[in-house]
Image (cartoon, helix red, strand yellow):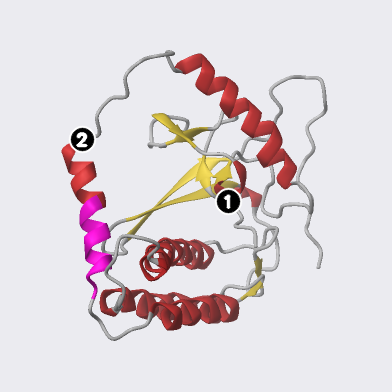
Amino acid sequence: HYNMGGIPTNYHGEVLSPTADDQNRVAPGLMAIGEAACVSVHGANRLGTNSLLDIVVFGRAAAKRAADTVTPGAALAPASKDSTDKALDRLDRMRHAKGDMQVGALRLDMQRAMQQYAAVFRSGASLDDGVRKMDQIASGMADIGIKDRSLIWNTDLVEALELENLMGQALVTVRSAHQRTESRGAHAHEDFPDRDDENWMKHTVMWLDENNKSTTGYRDVMMNTLTNEVQSIPPVARVY
């Protein structure tokens, strides 16, 4: 149920938009917390019950940061016309979709493909097949159909919008796994059973455009604590 990784943030909960020159560039005004965010504290395999760290610790940190940066009573800046048009176009496109593919059937195809090809134990062959299969399944979004056209309690529309989000997440997950030629945490690559800190001690950051084309970047892993109150713990092998 947990997505390893997530939206890159700093420890204040501010979303990062990294560039080649600045890995820690902040996207002003945008925040993420909880299991949607990746503050880089779990490594490649989160321990059980450690979601409290995401929810409680960084939830509080984000609230404090918001209080420090937001001026009380200040007017909210209007959204750009491009961004609002894009959001409304997406809503209308989904609401009036007239294809033959049912949302539930396509979602099930995606779930089964990810379970088969992108589970904890992976190989080059399974990931090759997984990338091809997910590309094929994702293309089915262009042929989905929505029968309910209403704007009130339209669960068909909600599920379609959610599936589009899940499909993008599945694509970047299987593609980033395909690129990582090592084993680390919950990524157990049968063709590369050892951890490769020299080449892969880094976060994969992937951008996905509207045509499902992806661009890959990387961020350094934070190996040290912010203070000297506790000793930093080096990574150890995840043994199954």
Magenta stretch: helix, strand or loop mostly = helix
Residue 92 falls inside the magenta stretch: yes
Q: Residue 160 carries which label?
A: none
Give the amino acid type for the residue marked by disc 1 in the picture: Gly
Residue at the outermost front position? 152
Q: How far apart are marks 2 and 1 (CA)?
A: 30 Å
Q: Where is residue 216 in the image (x, y as percent from the top left)?
A: 40, 53
Q: Is mark 1 on a helix, strand or loop?
A: loop
Q: Callout 2: few (<14), some (14-19), or many (20+) C-alpha neighbours within 10 Å?
A: few
In this rendering, the label closer to the viewer, 2 or 1: 2
Direction from residue 112 to residue 139 in the image, left or right:
left
Which residue carries the number 1 mark?
Answer: 5
Q: Is residue 192 above or below residue 57?
A: below
Q: In this view, does 146 lie above or below 226?
A: below
Q: Where is residue 172 in the image (x, y as percent from the top left)?
A: 45, 61
Q: Which residue is drawn at 60% across and 57% down?
A: 3
- Work out whether residue 22 can be spotted: no
Give the amino acid type for the residue marked by disc 2 in the picture: Ser
Quadrant containing the C terminus in the rendered view: bottom right
- Work out whether residue 80 can be spotted: yes
Q: Callout 1: few (<14), some (14-19), or many (20+) C-alpha neighbours within 10 Å?
A: many
Nearest the viewer among 124 and 116 is: 116
Q: Where is residue 38 in the image (x, y as percent from the top left)?
A: 58, 43
Residue at the outermost bottom position? 100
Quadrant containing the N terminus in the rendered view: bottom right
Total numbered badges shown on the rendered structure: 2
Q: Residue at x 76, y 46 (%)?
A: 50
Q: Is residue 112 above or below residue 208?
A: below
Q: Residue 80 carries which label?
A: 2
Read off the magenta span: 88-97
